[in-house]
Image (cartoon, grey):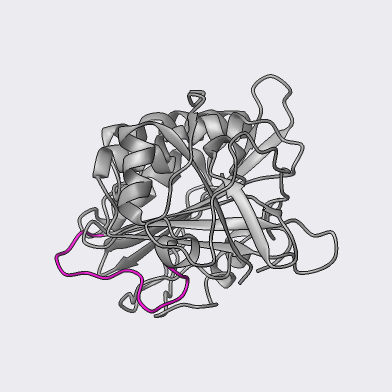
Amino acid sequence: MTDSPKGVAGDSGCTQFMANLLAMMVGTMVGVAGCVRGLTPEEPTSLLVSPASSPINTLIPQNSELPVQEPTHPTSIVSPVLPATVSVEPTAVSAVKGEERSQFARDMLEDSKGCDLPCWWGIMPGDSPWQSVEGLISPLGIFSVDITHPLSGQMDYYLDVEFTQQDNTVTAIDVASALFSSTATHKFAADWDRYSWSQIMARHGEPSQVRFEFRPPVEPNAPVYYQLWLVYDERGIIAYYEGPAEGVDEREMRTCLRFQDVSYIRLHLEAPQESNVLMRGVYPLSMQASTGVDKSSFYAATVASGQEVCVQAATP
C-alpha cells in the first residue's frame, strides 16, 4: 500500500493501477484493452451495531470527527483467477474536449446506461463483444478522464476503467476512482452515490462476503484508514472502499462508516456464474473477525434501518 495513488494525473494511471493489483492476488490478470481515467447522498442517522461476540473489539460513540485522508491505492485487493487475455489497444482518436468527457463520465455514473452491476456503462462481462468497448471509446478518444468540479473548475477526482477480453468478448471490468487531494469537495461521493455500499446492498441484497481491515500509518504522521470489501461471489461483483479512521491508542483504531468521507473506490466485475468464489483465503479478514460485526448485522443496519455503523478494533 502506497501513501498516495500513483497516476492520479498523467497517462501512467492505468499502468500504476494494474501494478497495484499484484499484492495478495489469487490469480493473474493480463491484457487490459482500454482505460478510462476518469446526487448528493442522504445524511445517515447513526446506529451503534453491537457485535455478537467480540473479545478484543468494541464499538465507538457516534458523531466522531475523523480526519480526511489522502487517497491511496490498495495493494490488498484480491482478484479472481481470469483466463489469459489478448490485449487490444483502441486506435480511435477523438476531438472531444476534456469537459465533455468529464460530463459523460458523470452522466454514466448516474445511470450506467440503465444496466446494473456487473454491467458497466452498457457493457456486460461474459456477454458484450469487444466491439462494444471500441464503440464506447471511439467518440471519446483515449478513455482518460480527470473529473473537474462543476463550480470551481478544479480537478476533483480521477476515473480509470480497464476492460479485459478473451476471444473478442469482454471477460472482466476493473474500475478505480479517487480524490486528487484531501481538500477536494464531497462531489466525489455524490457522483458515486449509486455505487455506495448502501445502494449496492439495497439493489443486490446481503453480500456473500464482507471484509474489513484497519490500516495503520506506514510512517509517522501518515493517515490511518480502513478498507471495506463487499463481495457478491456468484454475481461477479467486488466493491472496495477506503475511508478515514483514527487511532484510539497504539493498539486500537476506530471509524464510523460514512460514504461521504470515502476517498477511494474500486470495482471488479465479471460474468455471473454459480459456485463462483471471487475472494479466497483468510486475509483480508471478514468484518466479523476483524470488528465483531457480522455481515448480516451490517446489512440490516445499513439497508433496512438506514443507519451508520461505527466500529473499533485492534490494530492489525
Residue 234 vs residue 246, the one in the foreground:
246
Question: Which percent across, then down, holds residue 5?
Answer: 68, 58
The quarter in which the N terminus is drawn is bottom right
Q: Is residue 56 above or below residue 266?
A: below
Judge whether residue 116 is colored magenta: no
Question: Which percent across, then down, holds residue 248?
Answer: 71, 56
Residue at position x 66%, y 62% from top? 252
Q: To which quarter of the image does residue 288 belong?
A: bottom left
Q: Is residue 249 left or right of residue 204?
A: right
Judge whether residue 277 is colored magenta: yes
Q: To which quarter of the image does residue 299 belong?
A: top left
The answer to whether any part of residue 96 appears in the image is no
Residue at position x 43%, y 49% from top? 50
Question: Which percent across, then down, holds residue 278?
Answer: 32, 68
Residue 254 vs residue 220, the one in the foreground:
254
Q: Is residue 14 above or below residue 65?
A: below
Q: Is residue 100 above or below residue 167?
A: above
Question: Which percent across, then down, holds residue 179?
Answer: 66, 44
Residue lying farthest to the right in this orientation: 220
Which SS type dominates the magenta stretch?
A: loop
The quarter in which the C terminus is drawn is bottom right
Residue at position x 64%, y 64% from top? 215
Task: Write the start and end of the magenta stretch as one range.
Answer: 271-286
Residue at position x 33%, y 36% from top? 303
